[in-house]
Image: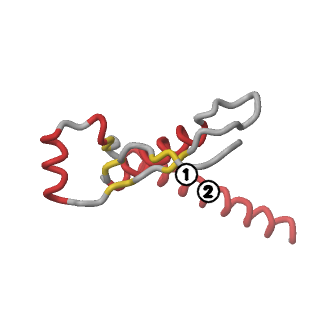
Amino acid sequence: MIRNEAFNHLKLLFIVSIILFLGTFLFSQKQGNPLVLQEMTWTDVKDYLKTSDMVIIPLGSTEQHGLHMPLGTDYYEALGMSKIISARAGVVVAPVLLAGYSE
């Protein structure tokens, strides 16, 4: 009896997981292209400013991360995350602001 209840709970959890996965997959397919300031023309920026004045400013630094990673890891991560947000929200990504101090 207890085994059947546990099995039913697992079955329900599996079904809910599949539904959430499919919903996430379908949602991610609807996102547009990121708006990166350096890739836009001045007329693109002018048109964008008619509808919004928001901008994403990625922050990254140049520092060591061991022998296995490049010095620009934080830069690449900040830019990559900003592009994902831009594609979903339709907000322009500004150039990466380099910040940080590492000896």
Q: Which residue is mark 2?
A: 17
Percent from the top left, x then y, of residue 94? 35, 47
Q: Is there CB contact under 8 Å for labels 1 and 2?
A: yes
Q: Which mark is residue 41?
A: none
Q: In the image, 29: left or right of 81? A: left
Q: Is residue 88 above or below residue 68?
A: below
Q: In the image, 88: left or right of 101? A: left
Q: Residue drawn 66% across and 56% down?
A: 14
Percent from the top left, x then y, of residue 97? 45, 47
| Numbered label tally | 2
Q: Nearer the viewer, residue 15 or 77?
A: 77
Q: Is residue 68 above or below residue 36?
A: above
Q: Nearer the viewer, residue 75 or 25?
A: 75
Task: Name the residue type under label 2.
Answer: Ser
Identify the image quadrant of the C terminus. Answer: top right
Disc 2 is placed on an element classified as helix
Q: Which mark is residue 21?
A: 1
